[in-house]
Amino acid sequence: MLEKTIEKDFIDDGKIWDLLEDSKNPEPAEVKEIFAKSRAKARLEPEETAKLLQIEDPDLLEEMFALAREIKEDVYGNRIVFFAPLYIGNKCTNNCLYCGFRRDNRAIERKTLTMDELQEEVNVLVNKGHKRLILVYGEHPDYDADFIAETIRVVYDTKAGNGEIRRVNINAAPMDVEGFKKLHEVGIGTFQIFQETYHHETYAKLHPKGTLKSNYQWRLYALDRAMEAGIDDVGIGALFGLYDWKFEVMGLLYHTIHLENTFGGVGPHTISFPRLEPALNTPFIGKAKYRVSDDDFKKLVAIIRLSVPYTGMILTAREKPELRKEVIPLGVSQIDAGSRIGIGGYKKSEMDHIPEREQFQLGDVRSLDEVMREVCKLGCIPSFCTACYRAGRTGDHFMSFAKPGFVHNYCMPNAVLTFKEYLIDYASEETRMAGEKAIEEQLKVFEQQNPKKRQMVEDKLHLIEEGHRD
Ligand code: SAM
Ligand code: SF4
């Protein structure tokens, strides 16, 4: 499929620019109508998102941010799901002009974890309290579907202390349907592929001809192949800073609509919006004229939240702590913490090793414990819940469950319970105190909703205190 370039894909660059142009200076009345549609949690149409992207009026912007917070709270409750990235290998045959792993960067040491080293990394992560990982790979013949499937198996099979990893997501190069099937068979969680930029010409410039990644359409339709292979949860993303940010938001929306139309209403499970970070020996970074300011970054997060109310949104540790704090309430449902992106980086950091030259620089290098404490202080409940996945509630099942009632009656109690396990098994004293306070506040919310719900959660909390684990 798509070995050859098809004439026209679902991203029409000219049309996106026309829509953005025609949407300048939107009338407050039409903007309010769009807000009402988002409040009713309907996915927006491109014409509507284009108008949100062109809002300049400070009052309307304020209203938009408030609405993003409201939708986030309504759909996801005040919980934040935690995960960690685990870099498996940095060999790469591509030459993406912005990435430290690019083939022509001779300044980094190329390394792939052995299965023993992988177990050691997983050990460190489990002993910090992690339950979800995303494994990351360069694009190289060594990292074929069999190899990736083997790494997933090893991660699931690694037991450490009380814990284990319960959901393994993947960020790797696009595969064919046969390859994706192999990953489906070993129980992959989400397969994530970022289109980097949806703008065809910029894509061609940044991914030199002759490399595997130069085929825009092979990448654009990769998640179709993943879904065809039975992988229900797929993650899309754009690397913000390669091209105009408003264009990329439109690209993400068109991609969402394409997946929904092709797969019976099931869109992407998550959307990521990484910003370009400085990386060693990368010719593009220095002249990145499309760098996204912090203010525009906040806008784009809120606009994605309003455009696709039910899709998970991932904010990574590329961003600095201060900004993460501001952006999380605008719609984010998942964050990573305690992240290391060097190969073997978790074990090395345990040994106080100076980090090696990595793919790019991280903005937030705080420990998981510290970030969890902060998240509590923001009024959120950290969650390690993987119940939906384990119960087979993915893809269309997930969409039908991801309704407010379900989230509040099921996900919020589960967040509290998995957080309690973390507090007992892994947290520092300071985090434990902040965490217990956050749980107490949440129990009051349950009480107001339904006293029986509080009782049910409290009973389970006692069992956890007595040593029971999920
Ligand atoms: N090699 C695979 C690929 O390119 O899809 C997967 C792994 S790649 C390491 C994961 C993501 O890192 C890329 O999709 C890209 O968006 C992101 N990335 C690359 N260079 C970056 C940089 N300088 N700053 C921030 N993110 C970057
Ligand atoms: Fe390789 Fe992925 Fe980096 Fe491109 S972004 S150079 S494909 S690791």
Image (cartoon, grey):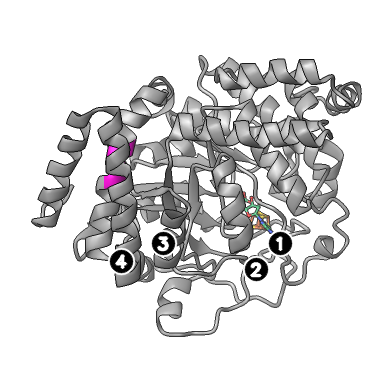
Residue with the mark numbered 3: 373
Residue 432 image offset from top left, x and y in percent: 30, 64
Q: Of discs 1 and 4, which sits in the foreground?
A: 4
Look at label 4 and name its amino acid: Ala
Disc 1: residue Cβ within 8 A of ligand 1's nearest atom:
yes
Residue with the mark numbered 2: 361
Q: CA–CA distance between discs 4 and 2? A: 27 Å
Q: Mark 4 Cα within 10 Å, few/some/many (few <14, many 20+)?
A: many
Badge 3 or badge 4: first in the primary sequence: 3
Vertical position of residue 271 compared to residue 341: above or below: above
Secondary structure under the numbered disc 4 in the rendered image = loop
Vertical position of residue 3 compared to residue 283: above or below: above
Look at label 2 and name its amino acid: Gln
- Asked whether disc 1 touches disc 2, contact meaning CB atoms under 8 Å apart, the reply is yes
User: Which disc, if any, is residue 277?
Assistant: 1
- Image point 50% across, 33% down: which residue? 269
Secondary structure under the numbered disc 2 in the rendered image = loop
Look at label 3 and name its amino acid: Arg
Residue with the mark numbered 4: 427
- Asked whether disc 1 touches disc 3, contact meaning CB atoms under 8 Å apart, the reply is no
- Asked whether disc 4 touches disc 2, contact meaning CB atoms under 8 Å apart, the reply is no
Toward the viewer: 115 or 269? 269
Q: Can residue 392 be seen in this snapshot? A: no
Residue 178 image offset from top left, x and y in percent: 47, 34
Badge 4 or badge 2: first in the primary sequence: 2
Q: CA–CA distance between discs 1 and 2? A: 6 Å
Give the residues in magenta: 412-416
Vertical position of residue 462 compared to residue 142: above or below: above
- Image point 54% across, 38% down: which residue? 235
Badge 1 or badge 4: first in the primary sequence: 1
Q: CA–CA distance between discs 3 and 2? A: 23 Å
- Asked whether disc 3 touches disc 4, contact meaning CB atoms under 8 Å apart, the reply is no
